Image: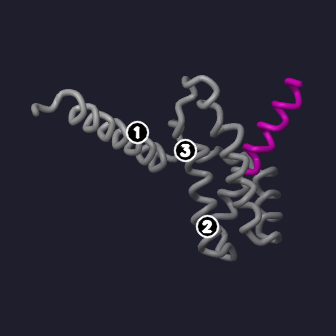
Amino acid sequence: MRTTLQRWAQQMKTQLSALYLAYQDPRTPWYARVFALAVVAYAFSPIDLIPDMIPLLGYLDDVILLPVGIYIALRLIPAPVMAEARLRAATSGQRTPVSSVAAVAVIATWLLALLLVATWLWRRFLAPT
């Protein structure tokens, strides 16, 4: 079971590297580029949308959302481009990109959510009447 999970994780990492390479290819349509970049940026972001410390939900993005995003991105990119990108990803020892832009976006989302909850709590319980 552990070997299967390790193999699956390695395949996901290779697919993400291939998506990143396909994103850079000029033959990839603009909408596929945008989607692939969003998936890759989220995958390599050091911060998750749902923190892993939240029981069960924390791993939801890693187990469900990310594979679904990869699947959709793979369907949007032309097959010859993806085949070439997979070959380049498998043969090159390219280091995976780290997305600080995605990290900033996720942090901003959490801060906005925290601000909205704090505002609601203030108005509901603490605001002078």
Local crowd at mark 1 within 10 Å, few (<14), some, or many (≥20)? some
**In the rendering, which numbered label is found on residue 33?**
2
What is the quadrant of residue 26 in the picture? Answer: bottom right
Q: Secondary structure at mark 2?
A: helix
Q: CA distance from mark 2 to mark 1?
A: 26 Å
Task: Name the kind of residue labelled 1 in the image.
Answer: Trp
Q: Residue at x 27, y 32 (%)?
A: 121
Q: Secondary structure at mark 3?
A: loop
What is the quadrant of residue 59 in the picture? Answer: top right
Q: In the image shown, does 13 or 42 lie closer to the viewer? A: 42
Task: Name the kind of residue labelled 3 in the image.
Answer: Val
**In the rendering, which numbered label is found on residue 110?**
1
Residue to which mark 3 is pinned: 98
Compared with 121, 18 (above or below) is: below
Q: In the image shown, does 116 or 58 lie closer to the viewer? A: 116
Task: Name the kind of residue labelled 2 in the image.
Answer: Arg
Task: Decide which of tag 3 and tag 2 comes sooner along the chain.
Answer: 2
Most extreme residue toward the front, as rendered?
Answer: 129
Task: Decide which of tag 2 and tag 1 comes sooner along the chain.
Answer: 2
Numbered range of the magenta stretch = 1-15
Number of numbered labels in the structure image: 3
